[in-house]
Image (cartoon, rainbow, N blue to C red):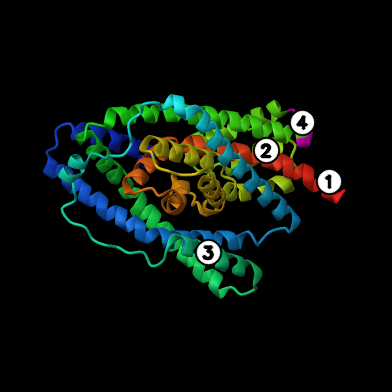
């Protein structure tokens, strides 16, 4: 019998627990060892992020050019529109809820000068990136759109290989080291005496985000029911199998067969469902967007980072594009979005670590929301496409 591997979420949970326990008795020099490791890993992330954006976004955009014309445009526009709506819904919803929920909540980052000095890394290794994040995004968009327009295959094949390399780096290096990185963060927070308050904030945020994903699905299927002239609650009920499957797999790609079957059950023609559902598994990330916006807002508010609405509006618009590159691995969406979180919201290494831990703790919720919403997109695409062809 093949031994089942421990998933990323259990590993992160164990890392958080061990970090808290070890932080209670580890001496300062031991904490500094893990602070040093975290510093090296954080610098590596800074180096790899532009390459990650280029290697994932460019081929992802290029592949959108291999479609069925009008049907492709309708699906992409709806998926992006739903993703944008979820981002702004999360932003305004959290701005209403967080001020009272997080009132008097301490900063989620270690800010005490004496504590930081006592846990400073033993040494640092500079790993400057080859290009800035915005340069990588612009280059990825240029190459992706260019590959979608030309007939040549040489560059496309090279970029596909480059994407495979980046995916190997994510699955073979970044994801395996993440639990150690998160362990170091919670070890340092416990050593600083801040972990109890941070965990209290974590729990509150998780409850809020779960409730918001439920409301978001109700809105999406209400729109789908109105456009498709069908009962929205029946549509949503039929998609619950996909929701439950995604909770277990934590992968939109792995849930495609169930999502496809349930979408056909909602009376979407097989040809339409067969096109929309696999495509939306890559480009429709409403649940992931909602989580990322809600998590970043919590860190911004508790850490008193100055971010304007205009900055957040731009961040949400970019997030909807950057996450087209999200690979089909647990936590892929957050890895694809780290670059713009750093460049547009000004998060430091510790804030990024907290962001990753908080996101992965709810990874299955976002994935389940994504795939369930794919069914709503399919119903609307079916109605619009029929209207255009009648």
**Helix, strand or loop at mark 1:** helix
Marks 3 and 2 sit apart, C-alpha to C-alpha, by 31 Å
User: Residue at position x 51%, y 48% from top?
Assistant: 311
**Left or right: where 15 falls relative to 58:** left
Question: Does residue 100 appear in this view?
Answer: yes
Which residue is the site of mark 2?
A: 376
Question: Does residue 275 appear in this view?
Answer: no
Q: Is residue 245 magenta?
A: no
> Reading the chain from its start, which is encountered first: label 3 or label 2?
3
> Reading the chain from its start, which is encountered first: label 3 or label 4?
3
Marks 1 and 4 sit apart, C-alpha to C-alpha, by 16 Å
**Left or right: where 16 falls relative to 326:** left
Q: Nearer the viewer, residue 65 or 104?
A: 104
Which residue is the site of mark 3?
A: 138
Marks 3 and 1 sit apart, C-alpha to C-alpha, by 36 Å
Q: Nearer the viewer, residue 17 or 356?
A: 356
Which residue is the site of mark 4?
A: 230
Specify start and end residues of the magenta stretch as a single range.
227-231
Q: Which mark is residue 387?
A: 1
x, y percentage for residue 160?
A: 51, 65
Q: Is residue 230 magenta?
A: yes
């Amino acid at each position: 019998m093949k031994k089942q591997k421990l998933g990323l979420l259990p590993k992160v949970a164990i890392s958080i627990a061990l970090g808290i326990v070890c932080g209670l008795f580890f001496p300062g020099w031991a904490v500094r060892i893990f602070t040093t490791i975290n510093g090296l890993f954080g610098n590596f992330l800074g180096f790899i992020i532009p390459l990650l954006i280029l290697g994932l976004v460019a081929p992802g955009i290029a592949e959108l050019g291999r479609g069925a014309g009008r049907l492709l445009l309708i699906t992409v526009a709806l998926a992006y529109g739903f993703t944008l709506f979820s981002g702004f819904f999360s932003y305004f919803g959290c701005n209403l809820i967080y001020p009272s929920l997080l009132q008097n909540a301490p900063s989620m980052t270690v800010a005490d000068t004496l504590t930081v000095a006592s846990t400073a890394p033993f040494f640092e290794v500079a790993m400057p990136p080859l290009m800035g994040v915005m340069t990588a995004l612009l280059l990825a968009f240029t190459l992706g759109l260019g590959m979608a327009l030309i007939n040549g295959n040489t560059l496309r094949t090279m970029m596909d290989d480059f994407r495979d390399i980046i995916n190997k780096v994510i699955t073979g290096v970044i994801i395996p080291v993440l639990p150690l990185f998160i362990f170091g963060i919670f070890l340092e927070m416990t050593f600083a005496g801040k972990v109890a308050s941070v965990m209290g904030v974590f729990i509150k945020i998780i409850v809020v985000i779960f409730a918001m994903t439920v409301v978001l699905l109700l809105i999406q299927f209400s729109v789908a029911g109105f456009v498709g002239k069908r009962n929205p609650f029946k549509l949503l009920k039929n998609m619950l199998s996909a929701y439950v499957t995604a909770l277990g797999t934590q992968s939109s790609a792995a849930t495609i067969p169930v999502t496809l079957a349930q979408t056909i059950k909602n009376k979407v023609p097989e040809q339409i469902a067969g096109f929309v559902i696999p495509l939306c598994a890559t480009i429709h990330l409403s649940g992931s967007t909602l989580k990322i916006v809600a998590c970043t807002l919590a860190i911004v508010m508790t850490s008193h980072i100055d971010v304007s609405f205009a900055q957040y509006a731009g961040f949400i618009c970019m997030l909807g594009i950057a996450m087209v590159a999200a690979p089909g691995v647990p936590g892929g969406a957050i890895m694809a979005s780290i670059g713009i979180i750093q460049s547009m919201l000004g998060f430091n290494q510790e804030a990024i670590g907290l962001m990753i831990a908080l996101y992965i703790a709810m990874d299955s919720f976002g994935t389940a929301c994504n795939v369930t919403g794919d069914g709503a997109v399919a119903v609307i695409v079916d109605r619009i496409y029929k209207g255009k062809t009648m």
